Each structure stands twice: as C-alpha cells, then as structure tokens.
Image (tube, helix red, strand yellow):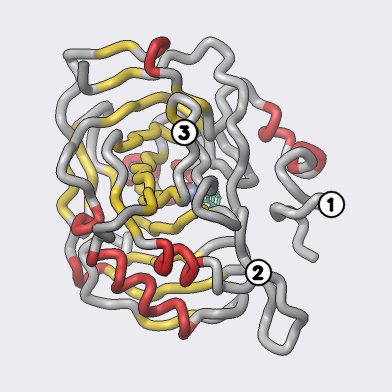
Amino acid sequence: QSVWGYDSDNGPERWHENYPLAKGDKQSPIEINSKDVQHDSSLAPWHASYDPGAAKTILNNGRTCRVVFDDTFDRSVLRGGPLTGTYRLRQLHLHWGSSDDHGSEHVIDGVKYAAELHMVHWNPKHGNFAGALKQPDGVAVVGIFLKVGKTPKPEMKRILEEIDNIKTKGKEAPFQHFDPSILFPKSRDYWTYHGSFTTPPCEECITWILLREPIEVSSDQMAKLRSLSKNGENEPVNPLVDNWRPPQPVKGRVVKASFK
Ligand SMILES: COc1cccc(N2C=Cc3cc(S(N)(=O)=O)sc3S2(=O)=O)c1
Ligand SMILES: [Zn+2]
C-alpha cells in the first residue's frame, strides 16, 4: 500500500498527514463558477511548439497513465498566455472516474467531465524540475477536459492503443513520434489561476491553464482507460479508476478568463 493514493485509508482527505502543503490556501483543483471569473483582455494567447521526437515512454505508475518527454533542453515548449518565459514539456497524464459522469479534477459550473488530461511544463530558469517546484512560477499545467460523445477525437487513439501494454503498475512501453498538441481542441480559450499539484507533494507552484473546450472521447475509450490496474502483475486486480482529487477551497483567488 503506497503512502498516498485515492482509497479510503490513503486518499485526499488524509494526504495532509504526510504532506502538510495539502492544507495550503492555493490548492488545486478548484470549482470554477463562470459568474466569479474575471475576463482579462490583457491575457495573451498561449502557444505550444512540441517536437514529436521528444516523446519517450508511456507508463502505468499505479496512480495514472503517464507519457514522458525529453525535457533536457527547450525541445517541446509552452509560452505566452499568462506565462513569462518558456516552459518545457515534461510529461502528460490523466485523471478519470469509474463511470462517464465524473472523473475530472476541476469542475466547471457544476459540470464534472469524464476525465481531465494534464500536460506538465516547468520553467528552466529555475535550473531543474526540483528547483522549479519551489517557485510560484515554476510549473505550468495545461488541462484539457474529456467529454464522452458521439464523435470521439481520433488523436486519443494513440495513447489508448498503448494501454494493453501497460495494464499493471510499473509497466512501461516505448512511446515515440507523438506530438501532444494534436490533442488540443479547436478553441484556444482558457481559464487561468494559481494553484498546486493535485497530488502530493501538493506544492503551490503551478500556473493552471484550463482549456474551455473539451475534447470528445467515446464511452469505449473511457472503458479502455478504466481497464488499467493499480496493482502490479500477479497481484489481486485493483482497477485504476477515480484517481481524481476533489475541488479545494478557492480562498479568495481570482480565476481569469481569456474570453468574454
Ligand atoms: C519531485 O517529484 C515530483 C514533485 C512534484 C510532482 C511530481 N509529479 C508527480 C505528480 C504530479 C501531479 C501533477 S498534476 N495532477 O497537478 O498535474 S504533475 C505531477 S509530476 O510533476 O509528475 C513529482
Ligand atoms: Zn494531473
């Protein structure tokens, strides 16, 4: 049993026992209510320029399915939007539910999406990732909501095709020649606010950029994601589902919107 997880004995309500930052006042995710959002006309558009050759591997770490990228130089970068400078893409991963009616971490006007995809970037001006964690502007995460619909986005197929090779905890497979920007929806509209990792250690070093337009997946694709296991090979099957943290107190933070 790992120190933290999403079960009753090691889940979000108990993370603060080993990770005190979990009780901070800039925690993520949060519930976004459009009536409280402030349109900021000074917010610039954001730009991602990713090198498909930077993709390395896909892994099941027992808590999520993660694609890892080469971030040893400015190879796949995010800039603009609320960000100052260039942020390097390090990894992407997902959070999902046990059924299509929930699974996202951020909740928008009461709506929970079936899943939420996070693209994690860090600011190399802080030397390395560990250094970036200690800075309020150290990390930028682009969040994309996954909605179950009739016209699933074919670009998700590449990730889901790999699931069969990483069924159990600790499994890893090569994952190359992949440009994650194909996952972006048409609209570049976003919300942005300052928050934290949604998992321990819960550092408050993240500029969140949440895309307003969800991408569509099929119910079968969601079932594929739910076929991942938390357990290792030859251990009792423990489905990897509901790996999301519930919304945390906003504590006076203002969410800005790039759109009216
Ligand atoms: C010192 O190693 C560290 C320190 C801090 C975070 C992490 N990571 C593991 C969880 C985690 C959760 C992320 S989320 N859901 O907020 O986008 S991003 C992320 S991580 O960077 O891969 C590793
Ligand atoms: Zn995440």
Pointer 3 or 1: first along the chain: 1
| Residue beneath disc 1 | 9
Q: Residue at x 36, y 78 (%)?
A: 161
Q: In the rendered view, does 95 fall on the left or right side of 214?
A: right
State the SS at label 3.
loop
Whole-Å distance between the Cαs marked 2 and 3? 24 Å
Q: Is residue 176 visible?
A: yes
Q: Is residue 170 above or below residue 208?
A: below
Q: In the rendered view, does 185 fall on the left or right side of 169?
A: left
- In this view of the protein, which residue sits in the foreground, 153 or 86? 153
Q: Which mark lies nearer to you, 3 or 1?
A: 3
| Residue beneath disc 2 | 239
- In this view of the protein, which residue sits in the foreground, 152 or 8? 152
Q: Residue at x 38, y 53 (%)?
A: 148
Whole-Å distance between the Cαs marked 3 and 1? 27 Å
At label 2, which amino acid type do we have? Pro
- The image position of residue 86, as x and y in percent, is 23, 41
Pointer 1 or 2: first along the chain: 1
The answer to which image quadrant residue 190 occupies is top left
- The image position of residue 247, as x and y in percent, is 58, 31
Quick one: quadrant of the C terminus? top left
- The image position of residue 24, as x and y in percent, is 65, 25
State the SS at label 1.
loop
Pointer 3: residues within 10 angstroms few (<14), some, or many (20+)? few
Determine if the C-beta at disc 1 is less than 8 A from ligand 1: no
At label 3, which amino acid type do we have? Val
State the SS at label 2.
loop
| Residue beneath disc 3 | 111
Instruction: Using the image, tell me which numbered label, if any, was put on residue 164.
Output: none
Quick one: quadrant of the N terminus? bottom right
At label 1, which amino acid type do we have? Asp
Pointer 2 or 3: first along the chain: 3
